[in-house]
Amino acid sequence: MPKAELHLHIEGTLEPELAFALAARNGVTLPYATEDELRAAYSFSDLQSFLDLYYALMAVLRTEDDFAELADAYLARARQQGVRHAEIFFDPQAHTARGVPIGTVIGGLSRALEAAPERHGITTRLIMCFLRDESAESALETFEAARPHLDRITAVGLDSAEVGHPPSKFREVYRLAREAGLKCVAHAGEEGPPAYVWEALDILGVDRIDHGVRCLEDEALVARLVADQVPLTVCPLSNVRLRVVDQLADHPLPAMLDAGLLVTVNSDDPAYFGGYVQDNFTALRDALHLDEETQRTLARNSFHASFLDEEVRAAYLKEVDAYRAG
Ligand SMILES: [Zn+2]
């Protein structure tokens, strides 16, 4: 099924093989002897235990070529999974903090993204995320450092450890981003409460909510999200792996669809969470018995929720309607 992926952290696509290859090339020692040993470390108890490993592995990403290879490897996999359009997050502060200039990160990623239509048949957008467990000042500095590169960036986002870091902390940098003509998204309502989703909508003025599964705890919030058709980029396998839900069969996605929410399915950090986007669709189909029409609705939603131009969006929607399994 043709689909768009709208919630994908490029750093979260770093597979063990590429991590070891880049470590060897850059002379970085990983705290794991083998790829299998590293994979065994991918059993997380919560968001923080995942983030600790995630940031440790990023040490292998140094040069523009490294970032280009990382993005190209994701795009090749995404195409295998039916992705026709990808809106890709990156975390500049996770790299600048290690001494990698922001221009190196954006240069490498955009090189791969610009080649993607021809190489992989995928259109793309780039979304620059701020780490919410860093200060508001650090986000502002990051935004200013990125200013010369804003022509390559479609939106800003907010990620990393959610609880204790409400969206309102980043009011100022989002105001600047909107002034600069960028779209805005934010992770909210994954581990954090529904109040964070309200803040993302009313204080940051976001166009989409990333995750948002906890909105179901607040009826008025659901009504607002439905009325405005605010897209939610839900990541089912991530929710299981990070214990937002105990098992996929308990996932609130069917309830979210029934409530009339504009839900999309995405892979979040697929190298760490056990699957790319089609793997998420397949796992949902098996655990929740989603029929083909529901899957088609989710695919249609992904293009409706994207930042594509209307003409391209319409062409992709036609592909979804024409698709027949088999
Ligand atoms: Zn995420």
Image: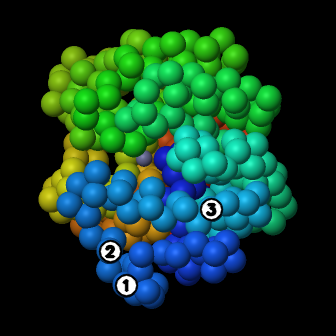
The residue shown at (70%, 17%) is 180
Marks 2 and 3, the one that precedes in the sequence: 2
Q: Position of residue 3 (x, y in %)?
A: 57, 54
- The numbered disc on residue 118 is none
Q: Number of callouts in the render?
A: 3
Q: Position of residue 173 (x, y in %)?
A: 54, 18
Disc 2 to disc 3, how far (Cα)? Answer: 19 Å
Q: Is residue 265 left or right of residue 25?
A: left
Q: Are marks 1 and 3 in contact (CB under 8 Å)?
A: no
10 Å crowding of disc 1: few (<14), some (14-19), many (20+): few
Residue 147 location (% of width, % of height): 74, 26
Q: Amino acid at mark 1?
A: Glu
Q: Give how far across and how far down residue 9 sits, in percent.
A: 52, 52
Amino acid type of the residue that numbered disc 3 sits on in the rendered structure? Leu
Q: Is residue 88 above or below residue 57?
A: above
State the mark number for residue 41.
2
Up the image or down, 83 lies above or below 144; here it is below
Quadrant of residue 319 within the rendered picture: bottom right
Tell me the residue at 70%/45% (across/down).
Answer: 101
Q: Which residue is mark 3?
A: 61
Image point 15% across, 59% down: which residue? 246
Q: CB atoms at circles 2 and 1 under 8 Å apart?
A: yes
> Who's the residue at 37% across and 35% down the image?
133
Q: Nearer the viewer, residue 37 or 286?
A: 37
| Residue placed under numbered mark 1 in the picture | 37
